[in-house]
Image (spheres, helix red, strand yellow):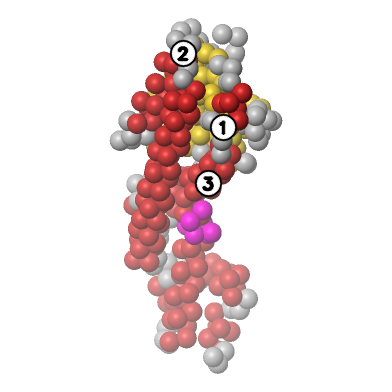
């Protein structure tokens, strides 16, 4: 192996698709199993194929469309290599890969990427691992049944579609759980770490998921919720600005006034004076 970071015992296999496969099927061009050090990196502006990559051990990062994704053990990467991309090992890593194209590869990728990104968890999913193994076995023996291989690629795409549907439902549950936590604890001194811990995600991953779903960061949502509650108290009670500030979770009156003006273009006192 001449690739930097690719270690001994790594294997790569190649297949030249028939004219019919190129015209009518998902067709495989190369596949393999790699053992890599953290020196391994693949960076391309374009490569006219799509990639399946199954991380069996270790950790990898993926850069695609100005986003970074992390794939750890038992995770799966589906990548459109026709656009600028990078994937690299962050530690000693073992993975299986498969390059393919044809049929509706690009449309399928866009459907799944827009829903889920390019990294999938294979927890409780043995079908995709079995499919990858089946194709690698065909490639290694140099006995590729192109029709069967096309069906296997389609099966992997179907499995990824199911995973992405489940992930979408799971994300909705996570976001709703986070919103409920914010609404129940907005008057307390809570931060991103507290909310992420409540939904059992890392702060980085939770923040990305929440913002994608709500079009606002968790912090922005928390501040907006506090400001809206402050407006209700200013309009419906005789509490002082100081009392309202602390009731709504602000740790100082000056910070409350500054934040309120930023969101409302009015001071709290001026807001209270207005007749609605």
- In the rendered image, the quadrant that contains the N terminus is top right
Name the residue that disc number 1 marks. 24
In this rendered view, identify the residue nearer to me: 169 or 178: 169
The residue at the point 53 percent across, 86 percent down is: 272
How packed mark 1 is, by other alpha carbons closer than 10 Å (few <14, some 14-19, many 20 or more), is few
Q: CA distance from mark 1 to mark 3?
A: 21 Å
Image coords of residue 158 (percent x, y): 42, 39
Give the answer, above or below, for where 8 lies relative to 91: above
Name the residue that disc number 3 marks. 111
Name the residue that disc number 2 marks. 143
Q: Secondary structure at mark 2?
A: loop
Q: Secondary structure at mark 3?
A: helix
Q: Is residue 134 magenta?
A: no
The residue at the point 39 percent across, 44 percent down is: 162
Q: Secondary structure at mark 1?
A: helix
Residue 157: give its label: none
In this rendered view, identify the residue nearer to me: 132 or 243: 132
| Tag nearer the camera, 1 or 3 | 1
CB atoms at circles 2 and 1 under 8 Å apart? no
Give the answer, above or below, for where 108 lies relative to 61: below
Q: CA distance from mark 2 to mark 1?
A: 19 Å
Q: In the rendered structure, which disc, 2 or 1, sits on the residue that comes first in sequence?
A: 1
Residue 213 visible (yes or no): yes
Q: In the rendered structure, which disc, 3 or 2, sits on the residue that comes first in sequence?
A: 3
Image coords of residue 56 (percent x, y): 40, 23
- For the magenta stretch, what is the residue range? 212-218
Q: In the rendered structure, which disc, 1 or 3, sits on the residue that comes first in sequence?
A: 1
Q: Quadrant of residue 156?
A: top left
């Amino acid at each position: 192996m001449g690739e930097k970071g690719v270690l001994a015992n790594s294997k790569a296999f190649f297949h030249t698709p028939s004219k019919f496969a190129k015209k009518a099927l998902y067709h495989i061009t190369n596949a393999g199993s790699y053992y890599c050090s953290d020196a391994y990196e693949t960076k391309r502006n374009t490569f006219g194929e799509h990639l399946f990559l199954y991380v069996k051990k270790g950790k990898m990062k993926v850069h695609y469309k100005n986003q970074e994704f992390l794939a750890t053990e038992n995770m799966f990467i589906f990548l459109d290599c026709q656009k600028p991309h990078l994937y690299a090992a962050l530690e000693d890593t073992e993975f299986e890969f498969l390059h393919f194209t044809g049929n509706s590869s690009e449309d399928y990728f866009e459907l799944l990427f827009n829903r889920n990104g390019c990294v999938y968890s294979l927890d409780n999913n043995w079908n995709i691992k079995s499919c990858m193994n089946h194709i690698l076995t065909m490639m290694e023996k140099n006995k590729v049944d192109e029709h069967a291989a096309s069906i296997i690629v389609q099966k992997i795409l179907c499995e990824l579609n199911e995973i992405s549907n489940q992930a979408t439902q799971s994300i909705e549950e996570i976001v709703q759980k986070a919103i409920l936590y914010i609404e129940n604890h907005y008057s307390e001194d809570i931060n991103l770490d507290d909310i992420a811990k409540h939904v059992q995600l890392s702060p980085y991953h939770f923040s990305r998921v929440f913002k994608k779903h709500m079009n606002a960061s968790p912090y922005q949502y928390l501040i907006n919720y506090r400001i809206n509650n402050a407006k209700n108290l200013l309009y419906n009670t005789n509490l002082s600005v100081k009392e309202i500030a602390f009731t709504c979770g602000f740790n100082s009156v000056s910070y409350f006034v500054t934040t309120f003006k930023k969101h409302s273009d009015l001071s709290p006192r001026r807001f209270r004076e207005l007749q609605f």
